[in-house]
Image (spheres, rainbow, N blue to C red):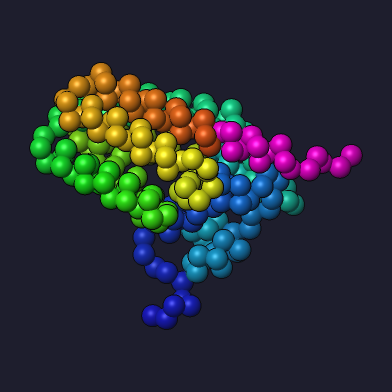
C-alpha cells in the first residue's frame, strides 16, 4: 500500500468528522464556508463515502447546514453556544472526578501525578503537541477511574465543541490547565469527592469561558455581510 492510496482502517467517518469539527471550532472554517466531501476526502486521503458520512453527522450535531444547490456550509457557533456546552460538560466532568476521588488508589494517583508533571514540563518548553496529549491522558484516567461508563460516554459527546488543537489557538490555556489540574490532583490525592467535583467543574467552566471569549472576538472581527 502506498501513501497515496486511501486508508482502509475502520471508523474513517469518525476521523473525518473530528477533523472538520476541529476546523470549525478553532475558526479555521468560518461560518458560511462551503465544505465539500471531495475536498475533505482529498485532504485526509480517504474515499468520498466516509467523508460524506462525516458531513452528514456534523449536520446532525449542528456544526453544518445543508441547502439545495449550495451543499454543506458551516453553521455559526457563538460564544454562548460554547458556554452552554461547557456548562453541561462541567456537571458531568465534576461527577466523574468525584467518583474517581472516591475510588482513587495509589496506582491512579501515581499515574495522574506523572501525567501532570509531564504536562507541566511540556508547557515550560513550549511543546504544545505533548501538552495536548498529556491533558487528554489526565482527563481520560480520571474518567476511567470513575467506573461510570455511561457518564464517560456523555462527556465524549459534549466535549466535541472543544477543538483538539486548543493550545495553539487560546492564549493562557496552558497556565489555566496546569493550575487547575494541580487542584484536581490535590483533591483526588486527599480522597475528597466534593473537592474533586468542585475543582473539576470550575476547571471546565473556566476553560469554556476562555474558548467562548476567543470565539466572540473572532466573530466580532469578521466583516459584516454586504447588503
Q: Give the residue drawn at x 50%, y 51%.
A: 168
| Residue at image coords 36%, 35% | 179
Q: Residue 88 appears in which quarter of the rendering?
A: top left
Which of the pair 30/135 is nearer the observer? 135
Q: Is residue 204 above or below residue 111?
A: above
Measured as percent of width and height from the top left, residue 156 is found at: 38, 39
* Magenta stretch secondary structure, dominant: helix
Location of residue 89 (image quadrant): top left
Image spot of residue 49 (x, y percent): 51, 61
Residue 183 lies, with reference to residue 32, above or below; the image says above
Residue 217 in magenta stretch = yes
Residue at 56% of width from left, 33% of height from top? 212
- Quadrant in the picture for the C terminus: top right
As drawn, the residue found furthest toward the left would be 106
- The relative height of residue 142 versus residue 15 in the rendered view (above or below) is above
Which quadrant of the structure image shows residue 37?
Answer: bottom right
- The residue at the point 38 percent across, 80 percent down is 1
Viewer-proximal residue among 26 and 122: 122
Horizontal and vertical percent position of residue 108: 16, 39
Residues in magenta, as a range: 212-227
* Residue 44 belongs to the span the image colors magenta: no
Amino acid at each position: 500500500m502506498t501513501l497515496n492510496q486511501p486508508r482502509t482502517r475502520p471508523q474513517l467517518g469518525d476521523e473525518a468528522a473530528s477533523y472538520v469539527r476541529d476546523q470549525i471550532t478553532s475558526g479555521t472554517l468560518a461560518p458560511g464556508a462551503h465544505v465539500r466531501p471531495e475536498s475533505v476526502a482529498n485532504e485526509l486521503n480517504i474515499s468520498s463515502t466516509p467523508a460524506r458520512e462525516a458531513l452528514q453527522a456534523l449536520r446532525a450535531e449542528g456544526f453544518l447546514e445543508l441547502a439545495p444547490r449550495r451543499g454543506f456550509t458551516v453553521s455559526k457557533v457563538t460564544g454562548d453556544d460554547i458556554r452552554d456546552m461547557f456548562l453541561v460538560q462541567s456537571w458531568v466532568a465534576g461527577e466523574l472526578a468525584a467518583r474517581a476521588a472516591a475510588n482513587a488508589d495509589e496506582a491512579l494517583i501515581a499515574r495522574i501525578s506523572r501525567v501532570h508533571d509531564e504536562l507541566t514540563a511540556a508547557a515550560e518548553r513550549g511543546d504544545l503537541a505533548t501538552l495536548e496529549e498529556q491533558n487528554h491522558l489526565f482527563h481520560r484516567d480520571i474518567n476511567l477511574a470513575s467506573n461510570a461508563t455511561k457518564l464517560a460516554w456523555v462527556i465524549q459527546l459534549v466535549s466535541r465543541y472543544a477543538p483538539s488543537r486548543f493550545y495553539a489557538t487560546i492564549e493562557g490555556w496552558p497556565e489555566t490547565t496546569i493550575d487547575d489540574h494541580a487542584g484536581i490532583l490535590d483533591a483526588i490525592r486527599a480522597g475528597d469527592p466534593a473537592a474533586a467535583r468542585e475543582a473539576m467543574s470550575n476547571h471546565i467552566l473556566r476553560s469554556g469561558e476562555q474558548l467562548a471569549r476567543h470565539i466572540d472576538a473572532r466573530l466580532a472581527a469578521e466583516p459584516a455581510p454586504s447588503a
